[in-house]
Image (cartoon, rainbow, N blue to C red):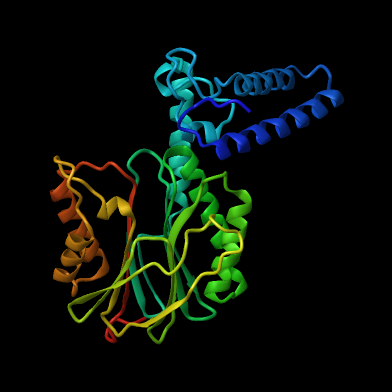
Amino acid sequence: MATGNPSMATTELAFLHEQLQQRRERLQQALAASPGAAPLAHLLAEVDSALERMARGTYGICPACNESVEKDRLLADPLTCYCLAHLTTEQQRALERDLELAAQIQRRLLPPADLRVNGWEAHYRYEPAGLVSGDYCDLIPDEKAGALFFVLGDVSGKGVAASMLMTHLNAIFRSLGGFGLPLDALVAHANRVFCDSALAGQYATMVCGRAGPGGDVELINAGHCPALLVRRGSVSVLDSTGVPLGMFCLGEFALRRVHLEPGDTLFLYTDGLSEARDSSSAEYGQARLQETVRQNAGREPRALADSCLRDARAFSGGQQLDDLALLVVRRASALGAV
Protein backbone atom coordinates (compact mmCIF):
# COMPACT_ATOMS: atom_id res chain seq x y z
CA MET A 1 0.00 0.00 0.00
CA ALA A 2 1.41 3.39 -0.97
CA THR A 3 2.01 6.03 1.71
CA GLY A 4 0.26 9.37 1.93
CA ASN A 5 -0.16 11.69 4.91
CA PRO A 6 3.32 11.89 6.54
CA SER A 7 1.80 12.35 10.00
CA MET A 8 0.16 8.91 9.79
CA ALA A 9 2.08 5.81 10.90
CA THR A 10 2.12 2.80 8.57
CA THR A 11 0.12 0.80 11.13
CA GLU A 12 -2.54 3.50 11.27
CA LEU A 13 -2.86 3.59 7.47
CA ALA A 14 -3.08 -0.20 7.37
CA PHE A 15 -5.83 -0.14 9.98
CA LEU A 16 -7.80 2.51 8.07
CA HIS A 17 -7.34 0.57 4.82
CA GLU A 18 -8.83 -2.50 6.49
CA GLN A 19 -11.73 -0.45 7.87
CA LEU A 20 -12.48 1.00 4.43
CA GLN A 21 -12.41 -2.44 2.83
CA GLN A 22 -14.87 -3.73 5.42
CA ARG A 23 -17.16 -0.75 4.82
CA ARG A 24 -16.99 -1.36 1.09
CA GLU A 25 -18.05 -4.99 1.49
CA ARG A 26 -20.97 -4.04 3.75
CA LEU A 27 -22.13 -1.32 1.38
CA GLN A 28 -21.99 -3.72 -1.57
CA GLN A 29 -24.10 -6.22 0.37
CA ALA A 30 -26.61 -3.50 1.29
CA LEU A 31 -26.80 -2.29 -2.32
CA ALA A 32 -27.40 -5.83 -3.55
CA ALA A 33 -30.45 -5.95 -1.28
CA SER A 34 -31.58 -2.40 -2.20
CA PRO A 35 -30.25 -1.64 -5.72
CA GLY A 36 -31.96 1.76 -5.96
CA ALA A 37 -30.65 3.22 -2.68
CA ALA A 38 -28.87 6.42 -3.82
CA PRO A 39 -27.36 7.28 -0.39
CA LEU A 40 -25.71 3.85 -0.24
CA ALA A 41 -24.33 4.27 -3.76
CA HIS A 42 -22.95 7.69 -2.81
CA LEU A 43 -21.23 6.28 0.27
CA LEU A 44 -19.75 3.43 -1.77
CA ALA A 45 -18.33 5.95 -4.24
CA GLU A 46 -16.71 7.88 -1.35
CA VAL A 47 -15.16 4.70 0.06
CA ASP A 48 -13.85 3.73 -3.39
CA SER A 49 -12.38 7.22 -3.77
CA ALA A 50 -10.58 6.92 -0.41
CA LEU A 51 -9.16 3.52 -1.36
CA GLU A 52 -7.97 4.94 -4.69
CA ARG A 53 -6.20 7.78 -2.87
CA MET A 54 -4.46 5.22 -0.68
CA ALA A 55 -3.33 3.30 -3.76
CA ARG A 56 -1.99 6.52 -5.35
CA GLY A 57 -0.26 7.63 -2.16
CA THR A 58 -2.36 10.79 -1.80
CA TYR A 59 -4.60 9.65 1.06
CA GLY A 60 -4.71 12.23 3.84
CA ILE A 61 -3.38 15.00 1.59
CA CYS A 62 -5.71 17.99 1.17
CA PRO A 63 -6.38 18.48 -2.59
CA ALA A 64 -6.77 22.24 -2.08
CA CYS A 65 -3.34 22.93 -0.57
CA ASN A 66 -1.41 19.62 -0.72
CA GLU A 67 -0.85 19.78 3.05
CA SER A 68 -1.62 16.96 5.49
CA VAL A 69 -5.18 16.53 6.72
CA GLU A 70 -5.33 16.50 10.53
CA LYS A 71 -4.62 12.95 11.74
CA ASP A 72 -7.25 12.91 14.48
CA ARG A 73 -9.93 13.79 11.92
CA LEU A 74 -8.83 10.96 9.62
CA LEU A 75 -8.91 8.49 12.51
CA ALA A 76 -12.39 9.68 13.46
CA ASP A 77 -13.66 9.71 9.84
CA PRO A 78 -11.57 7.83 7.22
CA LEU A 79 -13.53 9.52 4.40
CA THR A 80 -12.25 13.00 5.33
CA CYS A 81 -10.63 14.73 2.31
CA TYR A 82 -9.91 18.36 3.16
CA CYS A 83 -7.90 19.97 5.94
CA LEU A 84 -9.68 22.31 8.35
CA ALA A 85 -8.49 25.39 6.49
CA HIS A 86 -10.25 24.32 3.29
CA LEU A 87 -13.61 23.09 4.50
CA THR A 88 -16.61 24.75 2.92
CA THR A 89 -18.69 27.07 5.10
CA GLU A 90 -21.35 24.38 5.40
CA GLN A 91 -18.75 21.76 6.37
CA GLN A 92 -17.24 24.10 8.96
CA ARG A 93 -20.64 24.70 10.53
CA ALA A 94 -21.39 20.97 10.57
CA LEU A 95 -18.02 20.27 12.23
CA GLU A 96 -18.65 22.97 14.84
CA ARG A 97 -22.05 21.44 15.62
CA ASP A 98 -20.51 17.97 15.94
CA LEU A 99 -17.74 19.24 18.22
CA GLU A 100 -20.19 21.09 20.45
CA LEU A 101 -22.34 17.96 20.70
CA ALA A 102 -19.25 15.89 21.55
CA ALA A 103 -18.30 18.45 24.23
CA GLN A 104 -21.80 18.27 25.74
CA ILE A 105 -21.59 14.47 25.86
CA GLN A 106 -18.20 14.62 27.57
CA ARG A 107 -19.43 17.08 30.17
CA ARG A 108 -22.43 14.87 30.96
CA LEU A 109 -20.16 11.86 31.49
CA LEU A 110 -18.21 13.63 34.22
CA PRO A 111 -19.13 12.93 37.87
CA PRO A 112 -20.06 15.66 40.36
CA ALA A 113 -17.07 17.97 40.87
CA ASP A 114 -17.27 17.59 44.67
CA LEU A 115 -17.98 14.26 46.32
CA ARG A 116 -18.12 13.12 49.95
CA VAL A 117 -18.76 9.40 50.42
CA ASN A 118 -17.66 6.52 52.65
CA GLY A 119 -15.26 8.65 54.67
CA TRP A 120 -13.62 10.22 51.59
CA GLU A 121 -13.90 13.59 49.93
CA ALA A 122 -12.84 14.33 46.36
CA HIS A 123 -12.67 17.22 43.94
CA TYR A 124 -11.52 17.32 40.32
CA ARG A 125 -10.90 19.91 37.62
CA TYR A 126 -11.33 19.05 33.94
CA GLU A 127 -10.22 21.68 31.44
CA PRO A 128 -9.97 20.81 27.71
CA ALA A 129 -7.57 22.85 25.60
CA GLY A 130 -10.28 22.93 22.90
CA LEU A 131 -13.93 21.92 22.78
CA VAL A 132 -13.21 18.25 23.48
CA SER A 133 -10.59 16.48 25.55
CA GLY A 134 -8.65 13.22 25.60
CA ASP A 135 -8.32 13.33 29.41
CA TYR A 136 -10.44 10.94 31.46
CA CYS A 137 -11.72 11.42 35.01
CA ASP A 138 -14.28 9.49 37.02
CA LEU A 139 -15.43 8.88 40.61
CA ILE A 140 -17.60 5.83 41.29
CA PRO A 141 -18.88 5.14 44.83
CA ASP A 142 -19.20 1.43 45.72
CA GLU A 143 -21.90 1.44 48.36
CA LYS A 144 -21.86 -2.35 48.77
CA ALA A 145 -18.15 -2.42 49.67
CA GLY A 146 -18.19 1.02 51.30
CA ALA A 147 -15.41 2.12 48.94
CA LEU A 148 -14.68 4.82 46.36
CA PHE A 149 -13.27 3.97 42.92
CA PHE A 150 -11.39 6.83 41.26
CA VAL A 151 -9.52 7.16 37.97
CA LEU A 152 -7.64 9.83 36.05
CA GLY A 153 -6.21 9.18 32.58
CA ASP A 154 -4.91 10.63 29.35
CA VAL A 155 -5.56 9.16 25.89
CA SER A 156 -2.81 9.52 23.31
CA GLY A 157 -3.39 12.20 20.67
CA LYS A 158 -5.73 15.16 20.71
CA GLY A 159 -9.06 16.31 19.35
CA VAL A 160 -11.99 14.21 18.20
CA ALA A 161 -10.25 10.83 18.01
CA ALA A 162 -8.87 11.15 21.54
CA SER A 163 -12.23 12.33 22.89
CA MET A 164 -13.94 9.30 21.36
CA LEU A 165 -11.49 6.99 23.12
CA MET A 166 -12.02 8.89 26.38
CA THR A 167 -15.75 8.21 26.07
CA HIS A 168 -14.99 4.56 25.36
CA LEU A 169 -12.80 4.27 28.47
CA ASN A 170 -15.59 5.73 30.54
CA ALA A 171 -18.00 3.09 29.25
CA ILE A 172 -15.50 0.27 29.89
CA PHE A 173 -14.84 1.18 33.51
CA ARG A 174 -18.48 1.98 34.25
CA SER A 175 -19.48 -1.43 32.82
CA LEU A 176 -16.81 -3.44 34.66
CA GLY A 177 -17.16 -1.56 37.94
CA GLY A 178 -20.32 -3.42 38.93
CA PHE A 179 -18.78 -6.91 38.89
CA GLY A 180 -16.83 -6.57 42.15
CA LEU A 181 -13.52 -7.51 40.53
CA PRO A 182 -10.21 -7.01 42.32
CA LEU A 183 -8.62 -3.79 41.09
CA ASP A 184 -5.78 -5.45 39.14
CA ALA A 185 -8.23 -7.84 37.45
CA LEU A 186 -10.55 -4.93 36.60
CA VAL A 187 -7.71 -3.01 34.91
CA ALA A 188 -6.52 -6.12 33.06
CA HIS A 189 -10.04 -6.69 31.69
CA ALA A 190 -10.34 -3.02 30.73
CA ASN A 191 -7.00 -3.22 28.94
CA ARG A 192 -8.10 -6.21 26.84
CA VAL A 193 -11.35 -4.50 25.81
CA PHE A 194 -9.45 -1.29 25.03
CA CYS A 195 -6.89 -3.19 22.90
CA ASP A 196 -9.67 -4.81 20.87
CA SER A 197 -11.28 -1.48 20.02
CA ALA A 198 -8.47 1.10 19.82
CA LEU A 199 -6.85 2.09 16.56
CA ALA A 200 -3.27 1.08 15.88
CA GLY A 201 -0.86 3.15 17.94
CA GLN A 202 -3.49 4.48 20.33
CA TYR A 203 -3.06 3.99 24.07
CA ALA A 204 -4.04 5.56 27.38
CA THR A 205 -2.02 6.30 30.49
CA MET A 206 -4.02 6.05 33.67
CA VAL A 207 -3.86 6.00 37.45
CA CYS A 208 -6.78 4.47 39.30
CA GLY A 209 -7.54 3.36 42.80
CA ARG A 210 -10.04 1.95 45.23
CA ALA A 211 -10.25 3.71 48.60
CA GLY A 212 -11.72 1.68 51.44
CA PRO A 213 -13.59 2.97 54.51
CA GLY A 214 -10.68 2.24 56.86
CA GLY A 215 -8.18 4.37 54.95
CA ASP A 216 -6.58 1.60 52.87
CA VAL A 217 -6.10 2.48 49.20
CA GLU A 218 -5.22 0.16 46.32
CA LEU A 219 -3.52 2.00 43.48
CA ILE A 220 -2.48 1.14 39.92
CA ASN A 221 -0.47 3.54 37.76
CA ALA A 222 -0.39 2.46 34.11
CA GLY A 223 2.31 4.65 32.59
CA HIS A 224 0.81 7.86 33.96
CA CYS A 225 2.29 10.85 35.77
CA PRO A 226 3.39 9.99 39.34
CA ALA A 227 0.70 10.27 41.99
CA LEU A 228 1.51 12.53 44.94
CA LEU A 229 0.79 11.29 48.46
CA VAL A 230 0.41 14.20 50.88
CA ARG A 231 0.64 13.49 54.60
CA ARG A 232 1.54 15.70 57.55
CA GLY A 233 2.95 18.43 55.31
CA SER A 234 5.25 16.16 53.29
CA VAL A 235 4.81 14.92 49.72
CA SER A 236 5.79 11.40 48.55
CA VAL A 237 5.99 10.41 44.89
CA LEU A 238 4.22 7.20 43.80
CA ASP A 239 5.69 6.36 40.40
CA SER A 240 4.17 4.37 37.57
CA THR A 241 3.98 0.61 38.11
CA GLY A 242 3.17 -0.53 34.56
CA VAL A 243 2.71 0.27 30.88
CA PRO A 244 -0.23 2.23 29.43
CA LEU A 245 -3.49 0.56 28.45
CA GLY A 246 -3.62 -0.51 24.82
CA MET A 247 0.06 -1.39 24.37
CA PHE A 248 -0.14 -5.11 25.20
CA CYS A 249 -3.42 -7.01 25.25
CA LEU A 250 -2.20 -9.50 27.86
CA GLY A 251 -0.50 -6.94 30.07
CA GLU A 252 -0.51 -7.30 33.86
CA PHE A 253 -0.76 -4.34 36.22
CA ALA A 254 1.07 -4.17 39.53
CA LEU A 255 -0.94 -3.14 42.54
CA ARG A 256 0.37 -0.73 45.20
CA ARG A 257 -1.23 -0.40 48.63
CA VAL A 258 -1.02 2.68 50.82
CA HIS A 259 -2.79 3.71 54.01
CA LEU A 260 -4.16 7.23 54.48
CA GLU A 261 -4.84 8.70 57.89
CA PRO A 262 -7.56 11.35 58.31
CA GLY A 263 -6.38 14.49 56.48
CA ASP A 264 -3.99 12.62 54.15
CA THR A 265 -4.46 13.28 50.43
CA LEU A 266 -3.76 11.77 47.03
CA PHE A 267 -3.11 14.32 44.26
CA LEU A 268 -3.45 13.04 40.66
CA TYR A 269 -2.93 15.05 37.49
CA THR A 270 -2.37 14.81 33.74
CA ASP A 271 0.69 16.17 31.95
CA GLY A 272 -1.28 19.22 30.84
CA LEU A 273 -0.53 20.53 34.35
CA SER A 274 3.09 19.48 34.91
CA GLU A 275 4.12 20.29 31.31
CA ALA A 276 2.56 23.76 31.15
CA ARG A 277 5.04 26.23 29.61
CA ASP A 278 5.84 29.90 30.03
CA SER A 279 6.55 32.43 27.28
CA SER A 280 10.14 31.17 26.93
CA SER A 281 8.95 27.53 26.60
CA ALA A 282 10.31 26.60 30.06
CA GLU A 283 8.30 23.76 31.64
CA TYR A 284 6.35 24.16 34.88
CA GLY A 285 7.65 20.76 35.97
CA GLN A 286 6.91 18.17 38.62
CA ALA A 287 9.28 19.71 41.19
CA ARG A 288 7.39 23.02 41.26
CA LEU A 289 4.07 21.20 41.35
CA GLN A 290 5.22 19.10 44.31
CA GLU A 291 6.31 22.21 46.18
CA THR A 292 2.99 23.94 45.52
CA VAL A 293 1.13 20.85 46.75
CA ARG A 294 3.34 20.72 49.85
CA GLN A 295 2.73 24.38 50.69
CA ASN A 296 -1.04 23.79 50.52
CA ALA A 297 -1.05 20.31 52.04
CA GLY A 298 -3.52 21.07 54.83
CA ARG A 299 -6.19 22.50 52.59
CA GLU A 300 -9.40 20.77 51.52
CA PRO A 301 -9.54 19.21 48.01
CA ARG A 302 -11.15 22.14 46.20
CA ALA A 303 -8.83 24.70 47.81
CA LEU A 304 -5.75 22.57 47.06
CA ALA A 305 -6.80 22.21 43.41
CA ASP A 306 -7.43 25.95 43.13
CA SER A 307 -4.00 26.80 44.57
CA CYS A 308 -2.17 24.47 42.16
CA LEU A 309 -4.05 25.72 39.12
CA ARG A 310 -3.53 29.34 40.14
CA ASP A 311 0.24 28.80 40.42
CA ALA A 312 0.43 26.97 37.07
CA ARG A 313 -1.55 29.70 35.32
CA ALA A 314 0.64 32.42 36.82
CA PHE A 315 3.67 30.52 35.47
CA SER A 316 2.23 30.04 31.95
CA GLY A 317 0.60 33.45 31.70
CA GLY A 318 -2.79 31.81 31.35
CA GLN A 319 -1.80 30.00 28.15
CA GLN A 320 -3.13 26.42 27.92
CA LEU A 321 -1.68 24.26 25.14
CA ASP A 322 -2.86 20.83 26.28
CA ASP A 323 -5.86 19.21 27.92
CA LEU A 324 -5.58 19.43 31.70
CA ALA A 325 -7.18 17.46 34.49
CA LEU A 326 -6.43 16.92 38.16
CA LEU A 327 -8.09 14.94 40.92
CA VAL A 328 -7.71 15.33 44.69
CA VAL A 329 -8.85 12.46 46.94
CA ARG A 330 -8.63 13.09 50.71
CA ARG A 331 -9.49 10.93 53.67
CA ALA A 332 -11.96 12.97 55.65
CA SER A 333 -11.12 14.00 59.18
CA ALA A 334 -12.82 12.05 61.95
CA LEU A 335 -15.04 15.05 62.68
CA GLY A 336 -16.27 15.36 59.08
CA ALA A 337 -16.31 11.67 58.16
CA VAL A 338 -19.44 10.37 56.47
Q: Residue at x 20, y 82 (%)?
A: 232
Q: Residue at x 38, y 38 (%)?
A: 131
Give percent across and percent down for residue 260: 33, 82
For the question of whether residue 136 can be seen, the reply is: yes
Q: Residue at x 20, y 50 (%)?
A: 283
Q: Is residue 194 left or right of residue 211?
A: right
**Which residue is the extreme one toward the front?**
2
In the rendered image, the vertical position of residue 236 relative to residue 114, given as above or below:
below
Of residues 99 and 314, which is closer to you in this image?
314
Q: Is residue 337 left or right of residue 84?
A: left
In the rendered image, the vertical position of residue 121 relative to residue 108, given as above or below:
below
**Which residue is the extreme one toward the top?**
64
Give percent across and percent down for residue 165: 51, 48
Q: Residue at x 55, y 51 (%)?
A: 168
Figure quadrant of the N terminus: top right
For the question of whether residue 125 can be seen, the reply is: no
Quarter where residue 182 is shown: bottom right
Figure quadrant of the C terminus: bottom left
Give percent across and percent down for residue 243: 47, 62
Give percent across and percent down for residue 198: 57, 48
Of residues 80 and 59, which is closer to you in this image?
59
In the rendered image, the vertical position of residue 25 relative to residue 174, given as above or below:
above
* Circle count: 0
Q: Is residue 305 left or right of residue 155?
A: left
In the rendered image, the vertical position of residue 272 relative to residue 221, given as above or below:
above
**Which residue is the extreme one toward the right?**
33
